[in-house]
Image: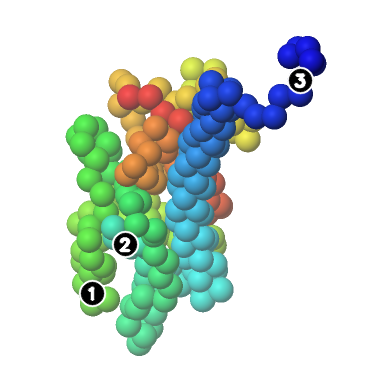
Amino acid sequence: MNPRGRRRGAFTLIELLVVISIIALVLGMGVASFSIMAKKAKLENAGRVVQSALSAARQFAITQRTPHMVVFSSKGIRVFRKPKGTQPGKYVHTVEFANGIDVYHLGDPAIWNSGSLVAAPAAYPAEADVEATLTTSGYIEFQASGSVKFVAPVAKAGPLTLTSGRSIMDPNVKEGPTSVVPMAGVTVAPCDILVIQRDDRARWCFVDVVKSTGKVRIKVLGVTR
């Protein structure tokens, strides 16, 4: 019988190793892609937590016709209703961040220009101390009209304008190689609030509060420093 006419019944060792290598490569690429997507989703979710807290503060201020202050901590955000008549001030809403998320309130120019960002404090002040504590550090306050008041030393910050002339909040600015935000040499705070994930500092979530309307916008973009 002609050996060339025989049907092969098994793979050689080299063929098996090649197939296994290809499978491992494909799986590795898939895991890496999933990890990147998961980190981005976590950062976006953290940004939406901030957005929902600020939007809640705005809604409370409008419906109750009373200014509401935004109080940051490393664990989350609380909304504080200022005293009204005989009613004392009190916390009325709380949202919490996932582990590994840092939030920076950049309205105070000194925080950004110091070159070393300092995350929000670990604990919230007691209800009786909120106004005194925040009066020293500055704060964001939503008014009954829905607009926002920035109390010194906090001031309206950003949003940063890219070299293309577009704001980082421009809907046409999408995450990608052409829209990486260059932070080196930037001397003004790029936004009102910055959300960063500790294990993925190549992306930041920028949070902008529109002063006249209280509208809150978020955008996740890659950064270079």
Residue at the spot of label 1 = 126
Of 98 and 138, nearer the camera is: 98
The quarter of the image holding the N terminus is top right
Tell me the crowding category of disc 1: few under 14, some 14 to 19, or many 20 or more residues within 10 angstroms, Cα based. Answer: few
Q: Secondary structure at mark 3?
A: loop
Alpha carbon distance from label 2 to label 3: 70 Å
The quarter of the image holding the C terminus is top left
Amino acid residing under circle 2: Lys
Amino acid residing under circle 3: Arg
Of 15 and 193, nearer the camera is: 15
Does residue 38 appear left or right of residue 98 in this picture? right
Report whether residue 175 is seen.
no
Question: Which numbered disc covers residue 6?
Answer: 3
The correct choice, above or below, for 6 with respect to 37 in the image is above
Residue ID at (51%, 60%): 52
Percent x, y for residue 77? 37, 63
Percent x, y for residue 208? 47, 44
Label 1–label 3 contact, CB within 8 A:
no
Percent x, y for residue 122? 22, 61
Amino acid residing under circle 1: Ala
Residue ID at (32%, 44%): 198
Which comes sooner in the sequence, label 1 or label 3? 3
- Looking at the picture, the colour scheme in use is rainbow
Residue ID at (51%, 66%): 56
Does residue 143 appear left or right of residue 105 in this picture? right
Alpha carbon distance from label 1 to label 2: 15 Å
Does residue 12 appear left or right of residue 185 in this picture? right
Farthest-out residue, front: 1
Label 1–label 2 contact, CB within 8 A:
no
Residue at the spot of label 2 = 75
Tell me the crowding category of disc 2: few under 14, some 14 to 19, or many 20 or more residues within 10 angstroms, Cα based. Answer: many
Of 66 and 140, nearer the camera is: 140
